[in-house]
Amino acid sequence: MAKKRAQESDEVKLKKKIATKTTNHSNPEGDAAVRSLKKRLKREQRKRRALAQRKKRAAGSKAAVSA
């Protein structure tokens, strides 16, 4: 059996983590942690957008014909 996915997506989790890290921005070492979280968030967003683009291209003119 496959693992069940969490209710929240990775993107939402990362956004929450970034928000909490930036509000508790008292230590100078937090900058690297926030930067790495932002990088991970951008990577997730790129993956999501690329997947949407692939699906759109795979559908091709089929979507236009059926609509």
Image (cartoon, helix red, strand yellow):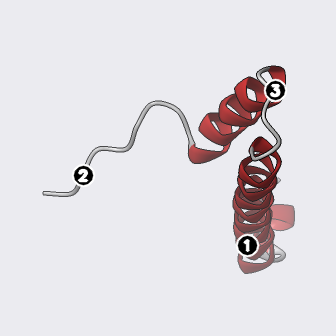
At 40% from the left and 37% from the top, the residue drawn is 6
* Mark sitting earlier along the chain (1/3): 3
Neighbour tally class for label 3: few under 14, some 14-19, many 20 plus, Cα within 10 Å:
few
Query: Of the residues shown, which amino acid type is indicated by label 2?
Result: Lys
Where does label 1 land, which residue? 59
Q: Position of residue 41 (x, y in %)?
A: 74, 53
Q: Secondary structure at mark 1?
A: helix
At 74% from the left and 76% from the top, the residue drawn is 54
Give the label on residue 26, or none.
Answer: 3
Query: Of the residues shown, which amino acid type is indicated by label 3?
Result: Ser
Q: Nearer the viewer, mark 2 or mark 3?
A: 3
* Mark sitting earlier along the chain (1/2): 2
In depth, the one of 66 and 28 nearer the eye is 28
At 77% from the left and 71% from the top, the residue drawn is 50
Please say if the residues under marks 1 and 3 sit with CB atoms less than 8 Å apart. no
Where does label 2 land, which residue? 3
In depth, the one of 51 and 67 nearer the eye is 51
Please say if the residues under marks 1 and 2 sit with CB atoms less than 8 Å apart. no
Q: Position of residue 52 (x, y in %)?
A: 75, 63
Query: Of the residues shown, which amino acid type is indicated by label 1?
Result: Ala
**Marks 2/3: CA–CA distance:** 37 Å
Q: Secondary structure at mark 3?
A: loop
Quadrant, the N terminus:
bottom left
